[in-house]
Image (tube, rainbow, N blue to C red):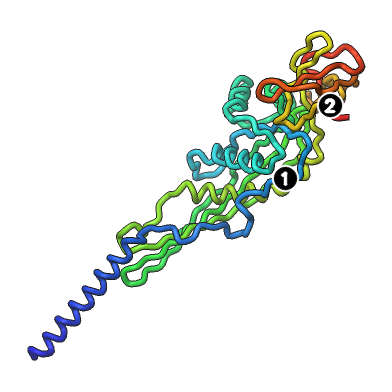
């Protein structure tokens, strides 16, 4: 009887020792991220197009609207930040800071609604020198959690899913270039000792991972639309026969480049709806040649032919 009791106590002691040892080891990895990946297999970023040497489009990204019932704080701003980063990394765009875009939208009383009509787009193009604007909305967002317990060890997996609507608007004509939607999925796995950090909690990385997945796939669809858009800059100032432009080396202009000057066309109003349809192409005025650069991203040009140039006239490649 005594012997059996001693064996029982010894077994209990060994089991408790094993638990403590296991826990001691688990503490070192408690809550550690074991995997952090997209489920859909899309890379986090588009590879920079190193062979691209053309002019870079100036793009403004508007904070996305949050139309989800959950009303996750900051998800619209996060979407705009992530998309701006993805666009920048392609090497084809100059992204205008969100605060500059938001300031103009606030002046136009458009900041809250996020609606971009042709008149607003034209204003943005004129003030910030934009070629295009991207806006959109988060229409669905969800998180799910799965987990398993193994004696004293626990594994957790969080999965986030998001649906994003987006639009690209040409700021010169006010015409909507594309309107589409995309979905993103992202998962994160954690593991640790029970009660020592394995419990999953809200993580902005999870949200941002799903957004990045959706917006990277969206960018694959956006690029062909951007490639079809004609680049244009603006005349910033004129001094005699010297013309100063709002685009320079960062944009991709080179000394010796020949540029056409075109007047902004008339705004066309739909007679039935009284809504602006955008601007018609204006008349060509002449030709400039780039001779140098100044400031952050400006260039100097001389008049090769033509007359009647004005501030805010468009400049385009021949």
Residue farthest toward the right in the current orientation of the protein: 305
> Does 40 sit above or below residue 119?
below
> Residue at (59%, 38%) from the top-left corner?
80
Asked whether residue 45 is in view, the answer is yes
SS at circle 2:
loop
> Does 72 sit above or below residue 17?
above
Q: Which image quarter is the C terminus in?
A: top right
Which residue is under mark 2?
A: 256
Between 241 and 175, which is closer to the camera in this rendering?
A: 241
Q: Viewed as shown, does residue 151 lie left or right of 67?
A: left
Q: Which image quarter is the N terminus in?
A: bottom left
SS at circle 1:
loop
Q: Viewed as shown, does residue 236 lie left or right of 107?
A: right
Residue 155 placed where, x, y %?
41, 65
Query: In whole angstroms, how far apart are the C-alphas of marks 2 and 1?
Result: 23 Å
Q: Would you identify the image quadrant in which residue 293 lies?
A: top right
> Residue at (40%, 56%) from the top-left corner?
200
Between 39 and 279, which is closer to the camera in this rendering?
A: 39
Between 13 and 101, which is closer to the camera in this rendering?
A: 13
Q: Would you identify the image quadrant in which residue 103 lies?
A: top right
> Does 266 sit above or below residue 14?
above
**Number of residues whose C-alpha sits closer than 10 Å to that of mark 2, classed few (under 14), some (14–19) or many (20 or more):** few
Q: Which mark is residue 50?
A: 1
Residue 129 placed where, x, y %?
71, 24
Q: Which mark is residue 24?
A: none
């Amino acid at each position: 009887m005594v012997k059996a009791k001693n064996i029982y106590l010894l077994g209990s002691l060994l089991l408790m020792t094993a638990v403590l040892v296991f826990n001691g080891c688990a503490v070192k990895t408690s809550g550690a991220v074991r995997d952090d990946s997209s489920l859909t297999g899309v890379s986090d970023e588009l590879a920079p197009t190193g062979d691209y040497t053309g002019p870079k489009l100036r793009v403004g990204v508007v904070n996305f609207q949050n139309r989800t019932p959950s009303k996750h704080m900051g998800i619209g701003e996060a979407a705009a930040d992530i998309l701006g980063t993805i666009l920048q990394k392609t090497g084809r765009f100059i992204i205008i800071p969100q605060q500059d875009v938001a300031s103009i939208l606030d002046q136009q009383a458009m900041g809250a609604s996020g609606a971009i009509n042709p008149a607003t787009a034209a204003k943005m193009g004129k003030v910030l020198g934009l070629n295009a604007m991207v806006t959109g909305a988060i229409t669905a967002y969800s998180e799910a959690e799965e987990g398993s317990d193994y004696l004293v060890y626990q594994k957790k997996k969080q999965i986030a899913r998001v649906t994003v609507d987006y639009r690209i608007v040409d700021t010169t004509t006010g015409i909507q270039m594309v309107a589409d939607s995309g979905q993103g999925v992202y998962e994160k796995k954690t593991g640790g000792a029970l009660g020592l950090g394995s419990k999953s909690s809200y993580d902005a990385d999870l949200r941002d991972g799903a957004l990045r997945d959706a917006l990277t796939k969206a960018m694959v669809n956006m690029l062909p639309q951007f490639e079809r858009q004609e680049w244009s800059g603006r005349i910033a100032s004129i001094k005699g026969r010297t013309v100063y432009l709002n685009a320079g080396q960062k944009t991709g202009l080179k000394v010796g480049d020949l540029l056409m000057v075109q007047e902004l066309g008339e705004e066309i109003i739909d007679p039935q709806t009284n809504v602006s349809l955008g601007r018609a192409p204006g008349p060509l005025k002449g030709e400039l040649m780039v001779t140098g650069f100044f400031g952050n991203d400006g260039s100097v040009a001389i008049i090769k032919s033509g007359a009647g140039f004005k501030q805010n006239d468009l400049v385009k490649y021949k």
